[in-house]
């Protein structure tokens, strides 16, 4: 229990670093909270017009999730600890104490965590995410398709051990996209790059 607790705290703290906010502030790109969807993720950073900042946000938000998982793996060698660290990092990104628990939607962190837990599953999710985003030109659709597909890939690559964690992460990604889901239903969700 103590070991699990350690990874909950460490994972949470790593995930809670809001790179979108840090990068846009450092680069003087304005207040992310008052741009576009107000979200702290890469999609919204792209709405500042700065592609490099958006790419860096995507990468670093992903890396922090992957790193939490890999760190737990290196120290404990235990898959359970890795999954706990990954879930905690994801929750840290979505509900960071530093932003009064109003964080991101977890897409980049989801991809980083899943890649670190199983790179074949992660790569397949990334492919689905990119494909759906490219075809529809809507970032949230890519995110939702990519996340939902994780269950299929966990079956396909016989990673039954990851199914519970994968399902939890996917449900949370959908929960964090409830405003996007409403906009998608209403047909008002903006395309990538639109304000
Ligand atoms: O990664 C979040 C993306 O799926 C949607 O972002 O800013 O359009 O709500 P946003």
Image: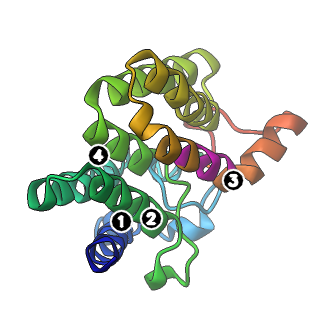
Residues in magenta, as a range: 169-174
Give residue 143's position: percent from left, percent from top.
56, 36
Label 2 to label 3, Cα distance in Å?
14 Å
Label 1 to label 4, Cα distance in Å?
13 Å
Q: Which residue is mark 2?
A: 93
Asked whether, in this view, residue 68 is left or right of residue 114, the answer is left
Secondary structure beneath dot 1 equals helix
Q: Are marks 1 and 3 in contact (CB under 8 Å)?
A: no
Determine which of the numbered discs, if any, sits on residue 15 in the image.
1
On whether ligand 1 comes within 8 Å of the CB at mark 3, the answer is no
Q: Which residue is mark 4?
A: 59
Q: Residues within 10 Å of mark 2 (few under 14, many from 20)?
A: many
Label 1 to label 2, Cα distance in Å?
5 Å
Q: Residues within 10 Å of mark 1 (few under 14, many from 20)?
A: many
Give residue 124's position: percent from left, percent from top.
39, 21
Q: Which residue is mark 3?
A: 175
* Lower position in the chain sequence, tag 2 or tag 3: 2
In the displayed structure, 51 sits above or below 127; it is below
């Amino acid at each position: 229990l103590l070991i699990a607790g350690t990874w909950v705290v460490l994972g949470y703290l790593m995930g809670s670093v809001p790179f979108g906010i840090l990068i846009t502030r450092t680069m003087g790109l304005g207040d992310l909270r008052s741009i576009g969807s107000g979200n702290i993720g890469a999609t919204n950073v792209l709405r500042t017009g700065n592609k490099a900042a958006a790419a860096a946000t995507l990468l670093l938000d992903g890396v922090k999730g992957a790193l939490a998982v890999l760190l737990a793996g290196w120290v404990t060698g235990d898959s359970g600890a890795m999954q706990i660290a990954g879930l905690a990092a994801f929750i840290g990104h979505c509900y960071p104490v530093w932003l009064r628990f109003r964080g991101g939607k977890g897409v980049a962190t989801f991809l980083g965590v899943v890649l670190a837990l199983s790179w074949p599953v992660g790569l397949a999710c990334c492919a689905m995410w990119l494909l759906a985003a490219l075809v529809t030109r809507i970032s949230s659709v890519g995110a939702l398709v990519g996340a939902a597909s994780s269950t299929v890939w966990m079956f396909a690559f016989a990673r039954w051990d990851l199914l519970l964690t994968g399902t939890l992460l996917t449900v949370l990604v959908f929960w964090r996209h409830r405003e996007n889901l409403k906009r998608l239903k209403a047909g008002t969700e903006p395309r990538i790059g639109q304000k």
